[in-house]
Amino acid sequence: MCTVSYFKTKDSIILTSNRDEKKSREKALFPNTLEVEDRLLYFPKDKKASGTWFAADENGNAAILLNGAFQKHTSNPPYKKSRGIVLLDIVKDKNFLHAFREYDLLGIEPFQLLVFFNKKLMRLLWDGTVKHEFFLNEHESHLFSSKTLYNDSLENNREKDFRRFQLNRNIESGEILNFHKKHQIEKEPEIDVSIKEIFLTVSITQLIIKQDQIHFAYHDLTENTIQHTKIEKRSFV
């Protein structure tokens, strides 16, 4: 939930997310599904809070959570509920944007969502006081990092590397995965050793949305395993 990228290639939409978590946190469960009215949601499930940081449906809509909003904040628990539960609540609605606008976020720790919904790309933020909405160009590539772990200097360096990466050639999902592996928290030289002693990039989740199907992959970096789920797509990108 701490490094997220978006790519639109010739024939697909690719969303990829690094999950940076405390080393002591229980492993997530994947794949996990939840039936909501006439839709089926797919997501890795956090065993501790029963929420998620990455959810998609069979219509090709998806939402990814990043901790923090515009700047690093001081965590002040207890909070009303987990941000991962908030994400699930929002994607249960047929209209993610409407659900975000209507959701009572008072008492929820700051977060941001990268949302791909009805072929539109949005960045939705809660700064602890006010909600913010930004519509992004879905034909361009984007990279986001959590403000709780990555400072402005590191984020700027990542952005430069991201732009260099895009100049190489036609980007494929495997190359994007390697880019995310390169930027695991334990491999970032600017990250303080004290943070690396506590946090680890435990997994990388990747969603590939094509015209006729969706491929959801969960890479457990602690056990070096990969789990795949193929979703029959109901609508078209």
Image (tube, grey):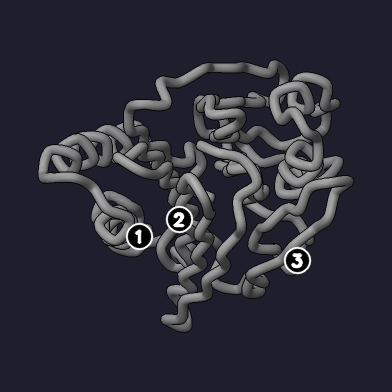
Kind of residue sitting beneath label 3: Lys
Dot 2: element = strand
Instruction: Indicate the position of residue 230 as horizontal and vertical percent values.
Output: 56, 64
- Above/below status of 63 relative to 231: above
Q: Earlier in the sequence, mark 1 or mark 3?
A: 3
Task: Kindly indicate whether the residue at mark 1 contacts the one at mark 2 (C-beta within 8 angstroms).
Answer: yes
**Circle 1: is it few (<14), some (14-19), or many (20+) Cα within 10 Å?**
many
In the drawing, does residue 184 fall left or right of residue 236? left
- Disc 3: which residue: 48
In the drawing, does residue 158 fall left or right of residue 215? left
User: Is residue 237 shown to the viewer in this render?
Assistant: yes
- Disc 2: which residue: 18
Kind of residue sitting beneath label 2: Asn
Dot 1: element = loop
Name the image quarter holding residue 52: bottom right
Name the mark nearer the viewer: 2 or 1.
Answer: 2
Rendered residue at 51%/27% (across/down): 121
User: Is residue 62 shown to the viewer in this render?
Assistant: no
Rounded to the nearest whole Å, what is the CA distance between mark 1 and mark 3? 22 Å
In the drawing, does residue 3 fall left or right of residue 130? left
Q: Earlier in the sequence, mark 2 or mark 1?
A: 2
Dot 3: element = loop
In the drawing, does residue 167 fall left or right of residue 127? left
Rendered residue at 71%/37% (across/down): 109
Rendered residue at 51%/42% (across/down): 148
Instruction: Indicate the position of residue 46 as horizontal and vertical percent values.
Output: 70, 63
Rendered residue at 45%/66% (across/down): 200
**Circle 3: is it few (<14), some (14-19), or many (20+) Cα within 10 Å?**
few
Kind of residue sitting beneath label 1: Gln
